[in-house]
Image: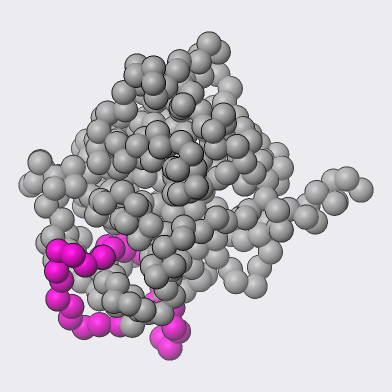
Amino acid sequence: MIFIFTFTILPYTSFSQTYFPYDKYNGTNLKWAEDLQFKDSDTTIIMITVRNKVAGSPKYFSDKSIRSDQYTTLICLWKNPDWYIMEVASLEMALQKSGCTKEVATFVHGDGKDFPLAINRAADIRLLFDVPVIAFDVPSLLPKSNKIRNFYNSKGNYKESVNLFAAYLRALGKIKENQPNLTFVLHMHSLGNYVYMESLKQNRLNDCPVVFETILMNAAAVKQKRHKRWLEKSNIQKNIYITYNKKDHTLNGAHLITFRKQLGERLKKPLAGNAYYINFQNIANKEHNYYRNTGLFKSYPNIKQFYMDILHGQLIPLKDASRFSQRNDGKGFDIR
């Protein structure tokens, strides 16, 4: 009975979302544009989506089906109260039109995102941390599905997106070769880490050059056990940081329905030798989206500074005792 009760309440408790309170950027109205003019002050997001287009849908892109041949490259421009969406021919063109010449953060969102919400979550990062954002977007919300079924459907979609994710990373690599001073960072949140795990397991990134200054695996909803085996294959970055929090309510829920400890939840040695592990338990409590929780930022400014440093490609000063303390159990560092 306890087992049945736990699974009955999970859809309503373990996958709650805390939305970033920039209400004017939480718009869901989309408008298609054949051409757009951009100013430096504009809020723009580059979207790399694997979703199929849906004619006549107010969302323009599917909640279910994904492409297997080629991703779609878009620029999204905010003009209150709408997002204007324009398709462009290439990633290079998107960066050029958006004026991205110094730094760009790639964001892979987690579970529970339709296309409009994926834009808004990327805009959160753009506005909070003042960094241009490319969102790698995968269908992860079935509006009429319960959260458990949705979770497994999303995992399947991330796994099916491995080929296009690898193609996107190779495209970034070519841009990096031509523009070596352009700084790239990869930020994957929650279930968004699944596509990277599968890419490494399937050896899809062996031919990729070093693309990223930093990879951030934030609150990763992937199996913790034996993660060292696949993570140490990662060679497209200079640094990897992994955040974890055993009180994370959402990842506790993922643990229950998968019967597996999650990488962003509970660590067990051996750890990957090419990664730094940062424990958020003491200050994030049950929060899952602590990378954009403005309430936590006010109480613990070092949280926002951590993500600010990461997203701008800076090394994290782990030896700074005012910000971090090394754990006695060998599981990385506690953030203060």
Instruction: Find residue 248 and report its image quarter.
Output: top right
Q: Main secondary structure of the magenta part?
A: loop
Asked if residue 46 shows in the view, the reply is yes
Residue 151 lies, with reference to residue 316, above or below; the image says below
| Range shown magenta | 32-60
Question: Which percent across, then down, holds residue 260?
Answer: 65, 36
Relative to the observer, which residue lies in front, 254 or 170? 254
Relative to the observer, which residue lies in front, 247 or 156? 247
The residue at the far front in this view is: 298
**Residue at the image point whose x is 48% and y is 23% from the top:** 334
The residue at the far right in this view is: 1
Q: Is 50 within the magenta?
A: yes
**Residue at the image point whose x is 60% and y is 30% from the top:** 266
Question: Which percent across, then down, holds residue 273?
Answer: 40, 19
Colour convention? one colour
Question: Which percent across, then down, holds residue 145?
Answer: 66, 68
Residue 206 lies, with reference to residue 43, above or below; the image says above
Residue 336 lies, with reference to residue 70, above or below; the image says above
The residue at the far bottom in this view is: 56
**Residue at the image point whose x is 70% and y is 39% from the top:** 259
